[in-house]
Amino acid sequence: MRNTPETHKLIKNILWDLNLTPEEVISVLSDRKNQDERRRFVVRLLRSYNWYTLLKIFTIEEMIEIVNDNKVINALFPNSLKEKYKNAREILRSTGD
């Protein structure tokens, strides 16, 4: 995960309804032990930003990991967004061969 001022700003923008700081969310996103909480924020980010903006927050390797996580993809809505990330997964799989 990228830890830049821009990352902090982007994360802050999705916290409008939560009483959390960007630093707290970054800590959750960096913690691989609490996968359910991490997924909750990943889903929120995927619903909020396009692919290119997400690459300002996550590395391409992290994005590949995210799109390969079925629990993340299945939590997305609307269905068109879910399909978008399923398609991204297929494209990334085909380019990795």
Image: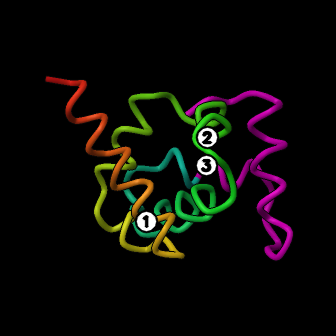
Q: Is residue 33 above or below residue 9?
A: below
Inspect the image, locate mark 1, and give the three-letter code of the amino acid beneath it: Lys
Inspect the image, locate mark 2, and give the three-letter code of the amino acid beneath it: Leu
- Asked if labels 1 and 3 touch by Cβ distance under 8 angstroms, the answer is no
Q: Quadrant of the N terminus?
A: top right
Q: Residues within 10 Å of mark 3 (few under 14, many from 20)?
A: few
Residue at 45 percent across and 28 percent down: it is: 60
What are the residue bounds of the magenta stretch? 1-27
- Left or right of residue 12, residue 64 in this image: left
Q: Which residue is mark 3?
A: 27
Q: Earlier in the sequence, mark 3 or mark 2?
A: 3
Q: CA distance from mark 1 to mark 2?
A: 15 Å
Residue at 31 percent across and 45 percent down: it is: 89
Q: Give the image quarter of residue 52.
A: top right
Q: Earlier in the sequence, mark 1 or mark 2?
A: 2
Residue at 49 percent across and 68 percent down: it is: 80
Residue at 44 percent across and 55 percent down: it is: 84
Q: Which residue is mark 2?
A: 54
Q: CA distance from mark 3 to mark 1?
A: 26 Å
Q: Is residue 51 above or below residue 35?
A: above
- Left or right of residue 46, residue 25 in this image: right
Kindly state the secondary structure of the residue where label 3 is placed: helix
